[in-house]
Image (cartoon, rainbow, N blue to C red):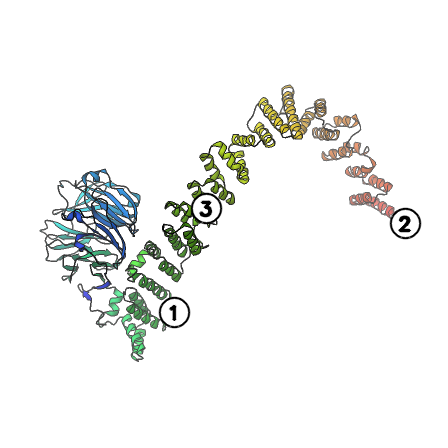
Amino acid sequence: MDCYTANWNPLGDSAFYRKYELYSMDWDLKEELRDCLVAAAPYGGPIALLRNPWRKEKAASVRPVLEIYSASGLPLASLLWKSGPVVSLGWSAEEELLCVQEDGVVLVYGLHGDFRRHFSMGNEVLQNRVLDARIFHTEFGSGVAILTGAHRFTLSANVGDLKLRRMPEVPGLQSAPSCWTTLCQDRVAHILLAVGPDLYLLDHAACSAVTPPGLAPGVSSFLQMAVSFTYRHLALFTDTGYIWMGTASLKEKLCEFNCNIRAPPKQMVWCSRPRSKERAVVVAWERRLMVVGDAPESIQFVLDEDSYLVPELDGVRIFSCSTHEFLHEVPVASEEIFKIASMAPGALLLEAQKEYEKESQKADEYLREIQELGQLTQAVQQCIEAAGHEHRPDMQKSLLRAASFGKCFLDRFPPDSFVRMCQDLRVLNAIRDYHIGIPLTYSQYKQLTIQVLLDRLVLRRLYPLAIQICEYLRLPEVQGVSRILAHWACYKVQQKDVSDEDVARAINQKLGDTPGVSYSDIAARAYGCGRTELAIKLLEYEPRSGEQVPLLLKMKRSKLALSKAIESGDTDLVLLHLKNELNRGDFFMTLRNQPMALSLYRQFCKHQELETLKDLYNQDDNHQELGSFHIRASYAAEERIEGRVAALQTAADAFYKAKNEFAAKATEDQMRLLRLQRRLEDELGGHFVDLSLHDTVTTLVLGGHSKRAEQLARDFRIPDKRLWWLKLTALADLEDWEELEKFSKSKKSPIGYLPFVEICMKQHNKYEAKKYASRVGPEQKVKALLLVGDVAQAADVAIEHRNEAELTLVLSHCTGTADAATADKIQRARAQAQKK
């Protein structure tokens, strides 16, 4: 345990800092770090180096090389720089490399050196050139801040949504500030700069002079400034050798330290742990590293070679040509367990577990001591937490074994935290491997989230490892394996040295029917890479035909898109695209070869484009449909009788051409009816147009124009039976019983007289019904008598007819006592019939 704490360095009485090696760098650099532009991404991200020959007159003709390495020093990309002079490098939150040139153009490269895009910081920057630049990160994304040769600042808080802001001018600024940085306050990016002994804060509206509270006197210049990882704290290095530390708002001082060194440091960064009360700053000179905080003494390290500091969420990464180390505050759980002579519950539990492995009775003594104090649960939690902050797997296992040992003596300790820590450490150990080179700490891992980590593994093309992690953590396929396989497929289509057939087959064999994977998205990436035939092959594996159509249209494969659209049942988009792309004749010919599409397009035209529908019928010589079209048009579009009659005449001509004489004759009859209805309206008034023939006759009868109705019936050859029904119904509705009686006697009724009885009873006129009941024929006599309520007479007629069905019908109407005699008469008649 003493050896374990040998690299612990106290800073005051309340905190320890330790520095341990992450990797032994094997990148074989040809240049010293001091001769390169250096940028390292946070959260264990990659390192970019660009040797800057523009600073060396002797090497002015040599083009620099941009190199990208993993945190362990493994090369990821190398490319000859062919663009303009670069002022600054930086990484975005998505691990894209931003290269800021002197002309204000920012080039964006991927992790493997693939060029993504570029953007300009504006004409003013182009005219005045770039003196200095900063890449910074906020909750909105990654931003770029520029200091121009005119000593003005321009920034964009989010390079993904570029909105340039020109910051206000600093009064009297004639030279570059001695130091400056970006702050993020109240969700807005600011610039803090030092001009001699004065500090200025620039926002979007004004330039304000600010003064740090409690600053030691005698300061004539600020040489360096640093903002914490979360933008909450600020450190200022003065020319007097003092380091002022306070809040980023410059309203509160935390502490001040005199390092007795007046030389400007190469770098100064914050080194603080989340939720820790300790605040410390790491300052680096050429061969010295110093950790200072709220304590009279500091921690100092000797640097054997050029080093570069990378601020992290919970510490500082330090890399040089040979090593990569991590400096951080020892977490509370680790300090309590491993501190010399510690009696913390976790320390006792760790000792108990070690003694148990030795089969020593001391294990029981330690365990009893923890249990008597009621701290066994706390001890288990301390060991689990400390294991998460350990970098060495052997120490992780030792602490987790101790936690597992302690859990055995607890009745209801929830296992979730233990299981989750085991899973997290297994993932962390896998990605910390030298060949992977992502040295995430437990705190950084939790802040970054597993989804972002998987994205970063995908960016590094570490697909097998990403899939193994998803399967190990049992992530949903859509969020895990499916998404990673889709990324792999998109990368696979970029391999232009492999044939289209082989790539498509390999992707299909790997993906199959994996849920959440869209072949159309992969095909779109292939098309974007200029591999159209590969895109078409990939689309064949897409099970949803509707997803294939948009890309096929984009690739100008309209006919194939139409076939796929027909399979999906949604052709509207394709048809409209074809209509705009082809001339009218070719468009119709294409549809003729696709009967289903032609049918669907006709349906579309019926609702949207009637004239186009007529052209289709004309081109196909489809006279039957053309006639139907003109009939619909006569009612839908025309209001004048003359126009409607003309449209109907055109329809009749089309029906004759189609050899449909019935439809043609019916259309001509409709034309005659329309003319007659107009004449009736002119002569009689009222509404006749658009009534049916039957309704026209009924309206005439109701209006008292029986003669006109009969004439109309003769003209249109309405059968007598139908005419009698129409007149009977109309007169009954008018309750014109006298006219109805005259009508019944005008000649023998072709429909009989039972309908007269029924109509009268429907109008509740029993008196009139009885008049016609006597005239009903013998076959319907019983029914007529029953309708008027004469049950006795109906029984006599039924007995006379000796009709069993009629007897049963009459018997069903004998419901009251008054009909009892009638019922008996029927029963006697039935008995006599049976005897005979």
**Disc 1 versus disc 3: nearer the observer:** 3
Residue at which label 2 appears = 835
Residue 344, by quadrant, is bottom left
Q: Dot 2 lies on which element?
A: helix
Type of amino acid under label 3 = Glu
Residue 292, by quadrant, is bottom left
Numbered tag placed on residue 547 in the rendering: 3
Residue 241, by quadrant, is bottom left
Q: Nearer the viewer, residue 419 or 458?
A: 458
Q: Is residue 500 left or right of residue 780?
A: left
Q: Residue at x 11, y 46 (%)?
A: 196
Q: Nearer the viewer, residue 74 or 63?
A: 63
Whether label 1 touches label 3, CB < 8 Å = no
Q: CA distance from mark 3 to mark 2?
A: 85 Å
Spot occupied by residue 326 in the image (x, y as percentages of width and height): 23, 61
Numbered tag placed on residue 203 in the rendering: none
Whether label 1 touches label 2, CB < 8 Å = no
Q: Nearer the viewer, residue 257 or 505?
A: 505
Q: CA distance from mark 1 to mark 2?
A: 98 Å
Numbered tag placed on residue 412 in the rendering: 1
Type of amino acid under label 1 = Arg
Mark closer to the chain start, 1 or 3: 1
Type of amino acid under label 2 = Lys
Q: Dot 1 lies on which element?
A: loop
Mark closer to the chain start, 1 or 2: 1
Spot occupied by residue 65 in the image (x, y as percentages of width and height): 22, 50
